């Protein structure tokens, strides 16, 4: 199976900090102790974002998980009938089309014009006025609340990137003239024709206002702008499913939903900057023009694959990637939006994930209403034209993913406060010889050979950096939703499927975007060994200074769906060529983008399952490992029959293993019904996934004296929060944005007090005037930072 990463479907002197009254996990009282979730049913329904507050007041929904617009959120915040949950769950960017135009001039193909865009957008206005203070301006892909913001903090705050339209227009003018363009009556022309920019702007939220703001600036810079306001599906089809050189678009207002904190990022920096991962213009689709950047790809793969020898080297790679991303400016980052999610006051069991807030999958396992067994969840949409349910190349929008996460138990999930991967339903043991040594891979470990279509032993002389043993007992003691047992065959098929997609020449030509992004990851795996009926041993060339990240990387299978569904889909996509896993392949071959909630697509899979039954088909050789067979003919036939009966009962083929199952899904009605999976052997009960609220962290009582050149000085304050606390500081010249001094200090473990000393040699270099001081608090127990800004006066 493809390794899915995510991401992946948004003042003043002190940055806004969401201070919340902590709710202890120990004070939470689950409603019962039956297997499965707290609620009996979750009803997902679509509510327009402008009407959602009125529908909340009318009692039509219990929790709304699409962010309210700021004005509506401010009104509900003071209404005692509701609880408003805030989370920095969305980031906003402009993606620019950098493709050269063989028949004209695309301004964004010029690096200088893209760089000028950094100064043409008014991030402060977006955060302060459009979002009324409920957003944080962004310069890079890293949100200002994320732990890795520390890694690039001096680069960001010392970048000098501010709203300066005159400077931007001057850069644009010089670049356009050098490219052969000329201004005629205030409009840029090339070879006698006016240059038109096609702007795709989203309409569902404040991005419409952002699009108008940016359009106005582009017009002032001399461009004709043809703006098209579109909802999610129409916009994303135009941008992400077309060849950039077809110029269906030049600029688009992107929005990115964030799903969990990540203490040490490896995915987002690649996703938003490096072409190899398939999220840069061209999308790695065959036949499309491709944005390329060799150094970003090389560094990105190193970071992703753990090819560093220390925390410091990892940070150097991360900084360089961030620096190159800024220089290239294919994406112009705008803001992190502090989303507002309203709930009825009687809704209980909500975990406030640092990033996702109540949208965390931990919440939906515990959410319940005190006087009812069902909870109504509102969203902007339940289904759109881009909502596609398949675990290989679909499930890429928040409307499907926010439902899917409640149906599936992942092997690992990031802790909602620390951002560190932790066991969810699989446990693990890590052994590593990295970064400088290796372990011997047992000769009887196997890998899947896509040429011979067999599991083959690796033999002697194979080495690997790390070894991880995964124990799937908590899966295997229970069943899939259709009643068939989860077992090692599901793990083994998933591994083999991943190799087939990546390395089989015919399959990789069909699903090119899936294949090329999977190969660099799978290239690092050295062998697998089944230890017993519950455990598999994985050998991989990957190292990380935090061993839980080794386990997260080495996890060989997501166990998202039973093998018979995966096998039938593979036959439909590759054997029959009647559907495709990815949107780009579907467009290229003019077949449906396979979705297991759509009747038409389900019947393709059902027909294949019946063919398997009629011919007694078991996927060839996949279940033959080290001379043993993992699946009998009888077991295979029973699985096929159970899948057929599932469709007859529920009208879909979304079969998984989580606390809820998909009982009904109605796209025209914008409705999905999830029912509790109460099987006796399901391993979890209410109360086991409740975390409550994250601990607060903030800087207080800051003392900032005047400084005198040549004399010693000191800043001090108190930092409050969990664990071992530290403070990072920057002293910046506000005129040049030069970082004059940077450093770190730890706080006193008892009082929380910290001091930042400045020696006379440093202050002697300062001229009288105002300087900027940035203080950033961080903890070893929580994956967020807290920033304090102040002005420092230097007096004669």
Image (tube, rainbow, N blue to C red):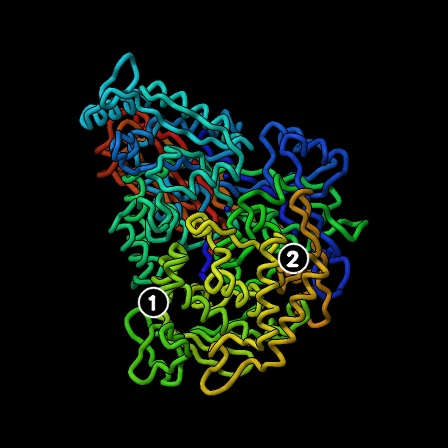
Residue 187 in the image: above or below residue 163: above
Q: Which residue is mark 1?
A: 523
Residue 794 in the image: above or below residue 535: above
Foreground mark, 1 or 2, reads 2
| Residue furthest right as drawn | 371
Find residue 774 and report its image quarter: top left
Q: Is residue 714 visible?
A: no
Where is residue 693 drawn, in percent x and y? 61, 50
Query: Toward the viewer: 670 or 138?
Result: 670
* For residue 754, side relative to residue 653 (left or right): left
Find residue 305 and report its image quarter: bottom left
Query: Toward the viewer: 149 or 497?
Result: 497
Quarter in which the C terminus is drawn: top left
Residue at image location 75% in from the left, 65% down from the top: 34
Where is residue 182 drawn, in percent x and y? 22, 19
Residue 137 in the image: above or below residue 286: above
Neighbour tally class for label 1: few under 14, some 14-19, many 20 plus, Cα within 10 Å: few
Give SS at disc 1: loop
Residue at image location 24% in from the left, 27% down from the top: 767
Where is residue 308 drawn, in percent x and y? 30, 62
* For residue 37, side relative to residue 577 (left or right): right
Q: Which mark is residue 460?
A: none
Q: Which residue is mark 2?
A: 652
Residue at image location 60% in from the left, 27% down from the top: 71
Numbered label tally: 2
């Amino acid at each position: 199976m493809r390794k899915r990463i995510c991401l992946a479907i948004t003042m003043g002197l002190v940055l806004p900090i969401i201070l919340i009254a902590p709710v202890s996990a120990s004070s939470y009282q689950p409603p019962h102790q039956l297997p499965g979730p707290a609620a009996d049913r979750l009803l997902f329904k679509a509510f327009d974002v402008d009407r959602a507050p009125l529908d909340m007041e009318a009692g039509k929904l219990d929790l709304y998980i699409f962010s309210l617009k700021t004005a509506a959120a401010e009104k509900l915040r003071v209404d005692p009938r509701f609880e408003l949950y805030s989370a920095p769950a969305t980031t906003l960017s402009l993606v620019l089309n950098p493709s050269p135009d063989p028949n004209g001039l695309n301004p964004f193909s010029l690096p200088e014009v893209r760089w000028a865009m950094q100064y043409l957008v008014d991030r402060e206005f977006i955060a302060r006025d459009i979002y009324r203070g409920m957003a944080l301006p962004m310069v890079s892909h890293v949100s200002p609340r994320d732990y890795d913001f520390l890694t690039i903090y001096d680069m960001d705050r010392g970048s000098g990137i501010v709203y300066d339209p005159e400077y931007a227009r001057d850069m644009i003018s010089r670049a356009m003239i050098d490219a052969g363009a000329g201004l005629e009556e205030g409009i840029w022309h090339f070879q006698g024709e006016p240059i038109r920019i096609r702007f795709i702007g989203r309409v569902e939220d404040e991005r419409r206002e952002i699009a108008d703001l940016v359009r106005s600036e582009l017009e002032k810079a001399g461009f004709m702008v043809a703006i098209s306001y579109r909802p999610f599906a129409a916009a994303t089809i135009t941008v992400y499913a077309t060849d950039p050189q077809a110029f269906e678009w030049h600029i688009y207002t992107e929005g990115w939903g964030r799903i969990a904190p990540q203490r040490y990022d490896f995915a987002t920096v690649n996703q938003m900057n490096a072409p190899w991962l398939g999220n840069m213009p061209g999308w790695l689709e065959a036949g499309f023009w491709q944005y390329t950047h060799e150094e970003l790809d090389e560094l990105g793969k190193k970071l992703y694959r753990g090819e560093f020898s220390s925390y410091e080297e990892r940070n150097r790679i991360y900084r360089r990637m961030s620096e190159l991303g800024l220089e290239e400016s294919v994406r112009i980052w705008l803001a992190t939006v502090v989303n507002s999610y309203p709930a009825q006051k009687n809704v209980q069991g909500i975990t406030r994930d640092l990033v996702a807030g109540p949208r965390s999958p931990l919440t939906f396992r515990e959410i319940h209403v005190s006087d009812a067994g069902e909870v109504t969840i509102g969203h902007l949409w339940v289904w759109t034209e881009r909502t596609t349910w398949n675990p290989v190349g679909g499930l890429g929008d928040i409307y499907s993913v926010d439902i899917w996460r409640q149906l599936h138990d992942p092997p690992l999930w990031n802790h909602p406060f620390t951002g560190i991967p932790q066991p969810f339903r699989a446990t693990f043991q890590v052994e590593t010889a990295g970064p400088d040594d290796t372990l011997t891979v047992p000769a009887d470990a196997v890998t899947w050979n896509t040429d011979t279509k067999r599991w083959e032993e690796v033999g002697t002389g194979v080495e690997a950096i790390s070894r991880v043993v995964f124990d799937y007992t908590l899966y295997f003691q229970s069943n899939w939703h259709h009643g068939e047992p989860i077992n090692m065959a599901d793990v083994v098929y998933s591994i083999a499927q991943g190799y087939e997609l990546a390395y089989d020449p015919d399959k990789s030509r069909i699903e090119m975007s899936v294949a090329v992004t999977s190969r660099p990851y799978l290239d690092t795996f050295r062998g697998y060994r089944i230890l017993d009926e519950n455990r598999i041993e994985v050998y991989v060339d990957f190292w990380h200074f935090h061993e839980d990240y080794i386990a997260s990387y080495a996890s060989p299978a997501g166990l998202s769906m039973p093998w018979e569904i995966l096998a039938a889909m593979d036959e439909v996509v590759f054997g029959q060529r009647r559907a495709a896993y990815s949107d780009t392949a579907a467009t290229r071959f003019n077949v449906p983008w396979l979705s297991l909630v759509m009747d038409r697509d389900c019947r393709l899979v059902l027909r294949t399952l019946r063919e398997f039954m009629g011919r007694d088909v078991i996927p060839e050789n996949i279940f033959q490992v080290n001379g043993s067979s993992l699946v009998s003919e009888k077991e295979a036939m029973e699985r096929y029959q159970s899948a057929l009966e599932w469709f007859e009962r529920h009208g879909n083929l979304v079969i998984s293993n989580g606390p809820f199952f998909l009982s009904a899904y109605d796209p025209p009605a914008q409705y999905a019904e999830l029912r509790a999976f109460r099987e006796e052997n399901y391993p979890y009960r209410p109360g086991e996934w409740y975390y409550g609220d994250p601990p607060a962290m903030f800087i207080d009582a800051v003392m900032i004296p005047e400084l005198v050149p040549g004399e010693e000085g000191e800043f001090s304050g108190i930092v409050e929060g969990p664990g071992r606390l530290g403070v990072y500081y920057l002293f910046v010249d506000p005129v040049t944005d030069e970082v004059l001094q940077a450093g770190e200090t730890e706080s006193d473990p008892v009082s929380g007090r910290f001091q930042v000393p400045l020696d006379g040699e440093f202050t002697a270099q300062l001229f009288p005037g105002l300087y900027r001081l940035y203080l950033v608090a961080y903890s070893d127990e929580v994956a967020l930072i807290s920033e304090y800004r102040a002005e420092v006066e230097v007096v004669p």
